[in-house]
Image (cartoon, coloured by chain):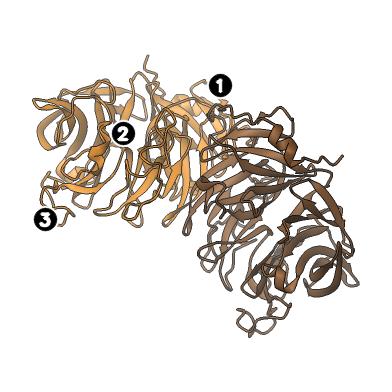
Chain colours: A orange, B brown
């Protein structure tokens, strides 16, 4: 079922560059319809700031959840429920399975959650993995690192295991970011909401470690008795996306609210992001969460929020040159209201939102930028696709 | 054709409080369907933060463009193309025509643009009017003030006439705001875009005067040779809404971009808001405006922008108690993508956007808050309506 797209074939396929009618009142933030091209492996879109084609890179996955490029141009894919790691040759579409992946706990929200190639991979060879694991004390989120020997992971090191383990299969998180020697890990509240406000637990937190898993001395709770020193921020519900702002180097995060109230946050040291005390969402039965407050002193407001929920997922700041109109924009996969969310951010605020691919019904779980400047996404129907510019 | 709704009748009309299904993927920012009630003069909505009924207050206008309450509870209505001023008794729906309104130039974008009752009306009796006028030198936007003698305007004073007059009928603006002794006037670029960057012209500017029409000495261009001293900010295309932030007292403005690129701006003294040098919009034929830039040093970014265009109009910060979930929110009428736009603003950023009444196909041109805390709107089908809370 895996479709291979050769460069030769792509060159022979004429792009359809039909201009698609503009958005209607019923879809105010910029809906378009994709026009299928003659090869039936792509669709052409005329969006606000780019004309692009979205095309299949590889299929046959279950739910691609983590994407990270190796310096040789291959794209590593963490397939969450399958618990597998693969490498796609994005030119040919050939997929190679990577061996040596540790066993994952793949029920419900578990599985192989993220993969991250170290920014200095050519020197140190590290690949970071986040996944749900069955430990003797119960299920929890762990982070390991390993190196590749051919197509096999070797020398696996356990860097982190979230405390405490919890007897359910929900809200494991997790995304990884490496920034100048530090490893950031986003962790869900394990559907045990009171833990998000409890700094004696890792759940519902953003964690900051050194790259080797040790705790930096300047973390905010290092000296607080009873608090876990690895915590960087707290009060999170179910973080799904994590990305560094390319200019400010701030850490941005998106998370699922309950019904409504999905958030984008700019993560600052030691801050409390409010869950479950304040939220713009509601219980799934419509009741308020807690006493229904949206603000409280000492708790951060989101940078932006979504009601109704879009179920935001992986997050990317676009820095390439292939799409000049998208430089500096924030892209977020959306799984409930299926689309690719494009946000124009200016310093500490969101200027504009556009919803791309919203006619495709793809649950977009992860979004990354390729070395070619194209945008790669993984969707829950098991495909990895890319957006590439089409000349106007 | 004017419909009168008595209090007695309203009390006899049972409210339908059916819960309407949540938004769909095709209308991501919160579309709902209104449920008509049995009197056929209202619709009930279940929105994100309020359950409300929208009901007809009065009909028979052409395009109500300005709304302002008198201390006696009557609502003044400026009917733009009709060039008439009326007072609605919002309890009974009885409409009284106000006499003595100066002749207006009512072609295309012209007409009676805005009416504003002075905040200290009980002491000074001033009513401010903005309208397009045919002066000996040509068509332009003027601002007068007058007092009511019974149901007739008397003692009209000319406070301002925009310079230069222009031989077309487009982009007159205009909205008025009074703030602690100062009068702010928003003026369109008269479809002569280069004027927006020219501080020797009033077009495409926000003007700041004293309440009596004289120029304050601390205006930014008072000492600049060749500049008009009344200018407060420049680089605007077609401002349609103007409101004071209830806490910061900043002046907020919305304006129409070309195709796409409608903006919300926070107006600061002497600043350049970029039109037509930078914009997120395009020419109506799809070409870029100028060289297509969206940023330039020395020019302000919008606080928020809309692509595709919603055609924003009148603007209100809600400060009432009738809708606790909407306190501090910004409401903007939308005429192209017909709806009432609700924005959650936090200091200098927009956290969230919801589109109310988007099933009604009403071009919402003006929005004001009543002394009852209800929200009053004027729509281009000639109705004045109000949103009132419905118990949940």
Q: Secondary structure at mark 1?
A: loop
Mark identifier at residue B74: none
Q: Nearer the viewer, residue A164 or B87?
A: B87
Image quadrant occupied by the N terminus of chain B: top right
At x 47%, y 29%, the residue is A338
Q: Quadrant of residue A367?
A: top left
Q: Secondary structure at mark 2?
A: strand
Mark identifier at residue A67: 2
Mark identifier at residue A38: 1
Q: Nearer the viewer, residue B117 or B285?
A: B117
Q: Secondary structure at mark 3?
A: loop
- Of label 2 and label 1, which has the lower sequence position? 1
Residue A153 x %, y %: 15, 29
Mark identifier at residue A223: 3
Q: Quadrant of residue A130?
A: top left
Label 3 near label 2: C-beta < 8 Å?
A: no
Q: CA distance from mark 2 to mark 1?
A: 28 Å
Quick check: B336 above or below B258? above
Q: Is residue A302 left or right of residue B77?
A: left
Label 3 near label 1: C-beta < 8 Å?
A: no
Q: Quadrant of residue B128?
A: bottom right
Q: Is residue B309 left or right of residue A370?
A: right
At x 32%, y 23%, the residue is A94
Query: The disc numbered 2 marks a residue on which chain?
Result: A
Query: The disc numbered 3 marks a residue on which chain?
Result: A
């Amino acid at each position: 079922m895996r479709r291979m797209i050769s460069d030769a074939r792509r060159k022979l396929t004429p792009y359809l560059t039909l201009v698609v009618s503009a958005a209607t009142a019923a879809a105010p933030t910029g809906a378009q319809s994709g026009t299928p091209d003659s090869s039936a492996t792509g669709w052409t879109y005329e969006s606000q700031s780019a004309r692009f084609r979205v095309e299949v890179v590889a299929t046959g996955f279950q739910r691609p959840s983590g994407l990270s490029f190796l310096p040789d141009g291959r794209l590593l894919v963490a397939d969450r429920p399958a618990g597998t790691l693969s490498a796609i040759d994005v030119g040919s579409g050939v997929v190679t399975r990577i061996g040596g992946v540790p066993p994952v706990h793949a029920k419900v929200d578990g599985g192989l959650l993220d993969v991250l190639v170290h920014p200095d991979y050519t020197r140190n060879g590290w690949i970071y993995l986040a996944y749900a694991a069955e430990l003797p004390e119960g299920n929890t989120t762990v982070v390991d690192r390993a190196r590749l020997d051919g197509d096999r992971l070797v020398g696996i090191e356990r860097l982190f295991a979230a405390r405490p383990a919890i007897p359910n299969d929900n809200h494991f998180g997790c995304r990884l970011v490496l920034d100048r020697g530090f490893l950031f890990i986003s962790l869900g509240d394990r559907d045990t909401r009171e833990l998000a406000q409890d700094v004696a637990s890792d759940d519902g937190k953003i964690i900051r470690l050194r790259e080797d898993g040790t705790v930096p001395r300047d973390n905010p709770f290092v000296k607080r008795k009873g608090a876990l020193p690895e915590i960087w921020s707290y009060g999170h519900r179910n973080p799904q996306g994590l990305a560094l702002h390319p200019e400010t180097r701030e850490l941005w995060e998106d998370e699922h609210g309950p019904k409504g109230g999905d958030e984008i946050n700019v993560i600052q040291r030691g801050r409390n992001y409010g869950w479950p005390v304040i939220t713009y969402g509601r219980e799934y039965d419509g009741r308020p969460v807690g006493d229904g407050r949206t603000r409280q002193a000492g708790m951060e407001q989101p940078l932006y929020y979504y009601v109704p929920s879009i179920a935001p997922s992986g997050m990317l700041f676009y820095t390439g040159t292939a799409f000049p109109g998208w430089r500096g924009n924030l892209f977020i996969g959306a799984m409930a209201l299926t689309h690719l969310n494009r946000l124009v951010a200016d310093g500490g605020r969101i200027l504009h939102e556009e919803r791309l691919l919203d006619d495709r019904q793809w649950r977009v779980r992860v979004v990354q930028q390729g070395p070619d400047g194209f945008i790669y996404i993984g969707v829950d129907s098991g495909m990895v696709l890319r957006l590439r510019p089409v000349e106007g």
